[in-house]
Amino acid sequence: MNMSYSSRQEYLNVQRSRYAKASSRQEKSRIIDEAVSTLGYHRKHVTRELNRSFAKREIRSSLYTTILSPLRENLKDLLVGLICHFGCYFCPLMKLLSDFLLSCLCFEVVS
């Protein structure tokens, strides 16, 4: 029970691969029992930890790079075009709106 956090994570990673390869319910139950006795965790927590997959985080980062980043760039171009086109008609309103939107998107305001 006196294991460091990194040691527990390393142990769980080894058990996670064993658990994924286990074919029978008895074998999986034995792996869970071993982890419960070694770590001192509750059985339900060990089961959740062994079933956890880390592939979702990679999907989120690739989602941002493939979809959201180009969308932000296109939105920036759209805002600049709208400001140039409608700026003369609604100058005070467009200036406030553009400053607000560009600051929300973390872009520098070009005057």
Image (cartoon, rainbow, N blue to C red):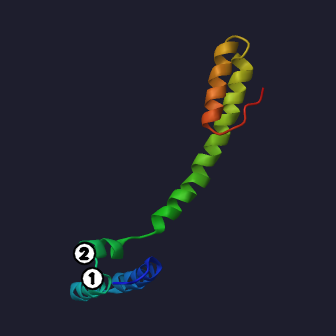
Q: Quadrant of residue 3?
A: bottom left
Using a 10 Å C-alpha cutoff, classify the residue at mark 1 as few (fewer than 14 neighbours), some (14 to 19) or many (20 or more).
some
Is 68 above or below relative to 45? Answer: above
Residue at screen point 72% across, 19% down = 85
Q: CA distance from mark 2 to mark 1?
A: 6 Å
Is 62 above or below relative to 23? Answer: above
Q: Residue 107 at x, y = what percent? A: 69, 38
Determine the residue located farthest toward the left in the rendered image.
26
Q: Amino acid at mark 2?
A: His
- The one nearer the camera, 7 or 82, is 7
Q: Residue 103 at x, y = what percent? A: 64, 34
Name the residue tied to disc 2: 42
Residue at screen point 24% across, 88% down = 30
Determine the residue located farthest toward the right in the rendered image.
111
Q: How many marks?
A: 2
Q: Quadrant of residue 43?
A: bottom left
- The one nearer the camera, 93 or 43, is 43
Label for residue 2? Answer: none
Quadrant containing the C terminus in the rendered view? top right
Determine whether the residue tagged by mark 2 lies in a helix, strand or loop: loop
Residue at screen point 66% across, 38% down = 74
Q: Tell me whether circle 2 and circle 1 mark residues in contact (CB < 8 Å).
A: yes
Name the residue tied to disc 1: 36
Q: Amino acid at mark 1?
A: Val
Q: Earlier in the sequence, mark 2 or mark 1?
A: 1
Residue at screen point 64% across, 21% down = 96
- The one nearer the camera, 14 or 77, is 14
Q: Residue 1 at x, y = what percent? A: 33, 84
